[in-house]
Amino acid sequence: MRLRSLTVVFISCLITFLSWVIIPPAVALTQIRLFDVSYKDCPPELAKGAVISSGSAAANCFIVIGKAENGTYKTVYDADIFGRIYDANNDSVMQNRTRLGSIPEVPPGISYFELRISVPANQPTPLQLKQFKAAGFSGQVRR
């Protein structure tokens, strides 16, 4: 009986020790600061035949550009871009949608990003870009 309890205690200690030594790398969400965000018209080859997601109305094509700051020392992968876009009348361009796209890789430091968006042709410009931010993973996410 006593040998059995010693064996259980030994195995428990061994498992605890190994769980401290063999730890898989944490893949946590990393916040990315987006700044100097603006937009420009799409080149004609991208804008040709643009329609909104419902497919029934004409749309204008724009490319959102800006800088992304990764304050960590690791590359961030699959960073989702969130933000709000309003037209000249302060009406939301993308109803009920704040995730606008993604950046495949954000290296440490400051880098540039681009994001293509389609806006219904009946919404007046200039567009207002607000509350832009991104969040990604410090390790490759399986697909």
Image (cartoon, rainbow, N blue to C red):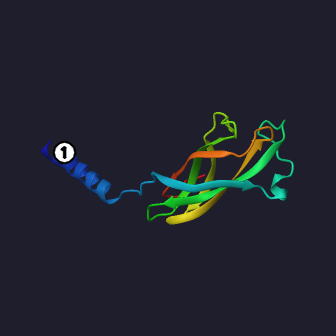
Residue found at the very far right of the displayed protein: 49
Residue 115 image offset from top left, x and y in percent: 67, 54
Q: Residues within 10 Å of mark 1 (few under 14, many from 20)?
A: few
Residue 103 image offset from top left, x and y in percent: 61, 56
Residue 30 image offset from top left, x and y in percent: 47, 53
Which image quadrant: the N terminus? top left
Residue 141 image offset from top left, x and y in percent: 55, 54
Residue found 77% across the figure and 55% down from its top: 42
Q: Secondary structure at mark 1?
A: helix
In this rendering, position of residue 7 left or right of residue 92: left
Q: Nearer the viewer, residue 85 or 76?
A: 85
Residue found 81% across the figure and 55% down from its top: 46
In this rendering, position of residue 113 left or right of residue 11: right
**Residue 107 seen by the camera:** no
Q: Amino acid at mark 1?
A: Arg
Q: Nearer the viewer, residue 16 or 39?
A: 39
**Residue beneath disc 1:** 4
Q: Which image quadrant is residue 89 in?
A: top right
Please determine whether, in this image, residue 131 is positioned above or below residue 18: above
Q: Nearer the viewer, residue 122 or 134?
A: 122
Q: Nearer the viewer, residue 119 or 97?
A: 119
**Residue 7 seen by the camera:** yes
Residue found 79% across the figure and 46% down from its top: 60
In this rendering, position of residue 74 left or right of residue 6: right
